[in-house]
């Protein structure tokens, strides 16, 4: 199970959330095992926050992801990924964790009489021993997609971890009925931190656009993108990437429209030319005049050469 995701390189507007996760880790080290829950809608930046936390903290972060497979999902998928990282690092001694041999045969032949409880105890012992040299973060992404066995194991660990230095972290989307009982139990814990990611403000959208485009965007463009995205960082990035296509290909799109219009001046009205731009670039441009800009981008109308003499410009 792959645990790494492709996340946006841009990190804005989440300073308080990052500080809350760092504080939760400090609690786990000073007071005992702790839980951190990161809640937010799709595209709000949960994975990006986790990636930044993993990048900036000196603590080891083991990540596993629940997968939307339908039905009850893949049993224990995120914890299999976590244990796999420990096995690859040679921190799991063969013969000690026989029930984990069900996941990784190199750990030994399962005894067959331990059952699920024995498996949970071995995962618990492995995580606590792995936190001996230094703090350990066990992060489960997309807990809302977790199967029943994963939810049960997560709750078992939250209740039974005793060694300081272990932080259980989970990201999830609110409102999923299956995770309701587990989340209700976790939030009642004395060392549980809940971080709720809100949508970006207009100023934060401007910062994100500036980081993506490499230049400070026009305030009007920031307002439009903020309104269309409703402050969701994933949508902001999608709009920024899409809007950047006609900026870099402005002359090309205009030349394409000109080529389409050159041989049919009587029918090439302003509306038809705008449709041609949309079909070529996906943008919805303001039609250029000597005083406007082509496709709303930074290139001037000079890149547009009108069709042959006699072309009907149209009135719409």
Image: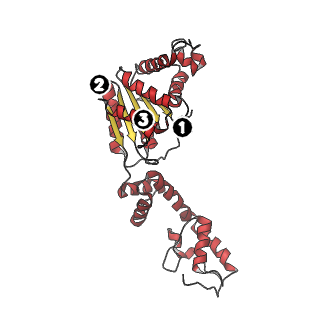
Residue 175 appears at what percent x and percent y? 41, 43
Of 292 and 113, which appears nearest the observer? 113
Q: How many residues crowd around disc 3 within 10 Å: few (fewer than 14), some, or many (20 or more)?
A: many
Q: How many residues crowd around disc 2 within 10 Å: few (fewer than 14), some, or many (20 or more)?
A: few
Say left or right for 257 vs 68: right
Q: Check contact, mark 1 vs mark 2: CB within 8 A.
A: no
Badge 3 element: strand
In this figure, which residue is indicated by the disc labeled 1? 67
Q: Quadrant of the C terminus?
A: bottom right
Where residue 31 is drawn, which disc sits there?
2
Residue 21 appears at what percent x and percent y? 35, 36
Upstream in sequence: badge 3 or badge 2: 2
Which mark's residue is nearer the viewer, 1 or 2?
1
Q: CA distance from mark 3 to mark 2?
A: 20 Å
Res. 92 in view? no
Upstream in sequence: badge 1 or badge 2: 2
User: Residue at position x 50%, y 70% from top?
Assistant: 296
């Amino acid at each position: 199970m792959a645990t790494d995701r492709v996340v946006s390189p841009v990190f804005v507007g989440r300073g308080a959330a990052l500080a809350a996760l760092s504080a939760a880790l400090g609690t786990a080290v000073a007071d005992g095992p702790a839980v951190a829950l990161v809640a937010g809608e799709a595209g709000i930046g949960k994975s990006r926050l986790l990636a930044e936390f993993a990048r900036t903290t000196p603590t080891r972060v083991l990540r596993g992801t629940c997968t939307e497979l339908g039905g009850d999902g893949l049993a224990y998928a995120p914890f299999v990924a976590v244990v796999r990282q420990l096995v690859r690092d040679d921190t799991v001694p063969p013969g000690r964790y026989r029930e984990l041999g069900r996941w990784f045969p190199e750990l030994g032949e399962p005894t067959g009489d331990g059952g699920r409880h024995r498996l949970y105890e071995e995962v618990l012992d492995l995580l606590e021993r792995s936190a001996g040299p230094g703090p350990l973060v066990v992060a489960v992404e997309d807990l809302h997609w977790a199967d029943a066995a994963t939810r049960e194991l997560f709750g078992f660990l939250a209740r039974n971890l005793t060694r300081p230095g272990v932080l259980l972290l989970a990201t999830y989307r609110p409102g999923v009925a299956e995770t309701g009982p587990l989340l209700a139990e976790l939030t009642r814990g004395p060392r549980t931190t809940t971080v709720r990611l809100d949508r970006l403000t207009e100023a934060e959208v401007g910062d994100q656009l500036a980081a993506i485009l490499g230049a400070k965007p026009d305030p009007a463009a920031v307002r439009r993108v903020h309104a269309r995205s409703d402050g969701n960082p994933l949508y902001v990035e999608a709009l920024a990437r899409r809007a950047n296509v006609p900026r870099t290909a402005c002359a090309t799109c205009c030349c394409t429209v000109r080529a389409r219009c050159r041989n049919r001046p009587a029918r090439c009205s302003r509306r038809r030319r705008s449709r041609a731009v949309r079909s070529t670039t996906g943008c919805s441009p303001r039609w250029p005049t000597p005083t406007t800009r082509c496709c709303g981008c930074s290139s001037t109308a000079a890149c547009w050469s009108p069709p042959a003499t006699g072309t009907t410009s149209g009135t719409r």
